[in-house]
Amino acid sequence: MAYNFKETMNRPERLAPGHRMCAGCGGTIAVRNVLRALHEGDRAVIGNATGCLEVSTFTYPYVAYEDSYIHNAFENAGATMAGVEGAYNALKRAGKLPADQNTKFITFGGDGGTYDIGFQSLSGAMERNHDMVYVCYDNGAYMNTGIQRSSATPMFADTTTTPAGTQSNGKPQNRKDLATIIAAHDVPYVAQTTFQPNFKDLHTKAEKAIYTPGAAFLNIMAPCPRGWRYETQDIMEICRLGVETCYWPLFEVVEGKWILNYQPKNKLPIEDWLVKQGRFKHLFKKGNEYLIEAFQKEVDRRWEDLLKRCN
Ligand SMILES: Cc1ncc(C[n+]2csc(CCOP(=O)(O)OP(=O)(O)O)c2C)c(N)n1
Ligand code: SF4
Ligand SMILES: [Mg+2]
């Protein structure tokens, strides 16, 4: 069926209002829109590694999810959902759950919980090809504990553990390319996305991830107004520029085949994306032009690499 924005947006909310995420948080937008991809009548078990999302949508004994929900430590979100999926299958085989009950298994983790601390259990769950979806809402730092750098933090970002100043230009390393690493696990479906005007890219990928049998991974750039230091209402523009500068390309890897979903007509210079965010303010000081050049070089290198993979 052709994508219908209005119909998709009118689907029932599975993340209820009343949670304590910041207004305009990209993490919440990611979760609401992934869950909209669930078909009517299908059930879900939601897992959640600790982070802003977990502490703000689950304050015991209250929970903001309409579906079953499991809180996880950082280290084991992937393993927990793999175990839940296995248990459901065993109960079905034993006739203790209705054979026609359709239940989907979806775990959310922040970048700290996914790229770093929960990586081992995520890698195991993906490699064993459990029928589950792992969604990383990537805001590029450990936001909940005060904006510490993670391996997803872009180079030169000013964070509390990589503070820009006289002795440092922000984070020295480039960000880890986790979607590519998960694709190397040979899982049936991997995709990278973010918020685009009609949300088609995100909704379509979320539906494919949830309904492709086997393990799936979604990496969603989910800006954080607090940590990235931009005006809340600019979130869509930040996401658009992330894609138009090729910092955050939209792609899928389906059964090992790389597919580029969007190629900008005129690739914008990376400073168009950087300049919108306070965490890169120091890059625009006189004498620091070389840092922006270095950033651009890394974006270009990864983009060329992706083009080759997608042929
Ligand atoms: C093993 C462990 N280490 C540290 C913490 C403290 N902690 C709680 S939330 C958080 C930050 C999570 O960062 P991320 O996964 O990127 O999610 P975000 O808060 O950015 O949404 C940290 C370090 C913890 N709960 N458990
Ligand atoms: S600090 Fe950032 S990631 Fe955390 S709830 Fe607020 S906007 Fe979202
Ligand atoms: Mg984070």
Image (cartoon, helix red, strand yellow):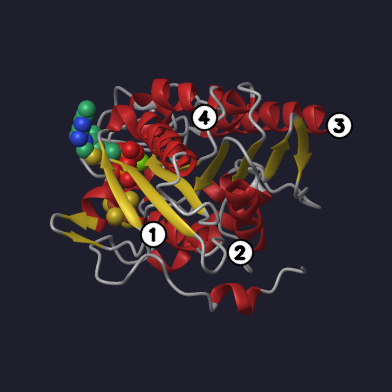
Q: Which three-letter amino acid code belongs to the residue tagged 1?
A: Thr
Do we see residue 160 in this rendering? yes
| Above or below, comparing residue 54 to residue 87 in the picture | below
Residue at position x 50%, y 25% from top? 174
| Residue 79 locus on image (x, y percent) | 38, 29
- Lower position in the chain sequence, tag 2 or tag 3: 2
- Lower position in the chain sequence, tag 3 or tag 1: 1
| Above or below, comparing residue 231 to residue 226 in the picture | below
Q: Are marks 4 and 3 in contact (CB under 8 Å)?
A: no
| Residue 43 locus on image (x, y percent) | 46, 59
Q: Check mark 2 vs ligand 2: CB closer than 8 Å? yes or no.
A: no
Q: Which three-letter amino acid code belongs to the residue tagged 4?
A: Leu
User: What residue is shown with label 2?
Assistant: 199
Disc 3 and disc 1: Cα gap in Å? 34 Å
Name the secondary structure under disc 1.
helix
Residue 28's mark?
1
Residue 245 is left or right of residue 173, and the answer is: right
Q: Are marks 4 and 2 in contact (CB under 8 Å)?
A: no
User: What residue is shown with label 3?
Assistant: 311
Characterize the local packing of mark 1: few (<14), some (14-19) or many (20 or more) Cα atoms within 10 angstroms.
Answer: many
Residue 124 is left or right of residue 37, and the answer is: left
Q: Residue furthest left?
A: 61
Q: Which three-letter amino acid code belongs to the residue tagged 2?
A: Phe
Name the secondary structure under disc 4.
helix
Q: Check mark 1 vs ligand 2: CB closer than 8 Å? yes or no.
A: yes
Q: Check mark 4 vs ligand 3: CB closer than 8 Å? yes or no.
A: no
Disc 2 and disc 3: Cα gap in Å? 25 Å
Disc 4 and disc 2: Cα gap in Å? 33 Å
Residue at position x 38%, y 25% from top? 116
Characterize the local packing of mark 2: few (<14), some (14-19) or many (20 or more) Cα atoms within 10 angstroms.
Answer: some
52 or 207, which lies in front?
Answer: 207
Do we see residue 142 in this rendering? no
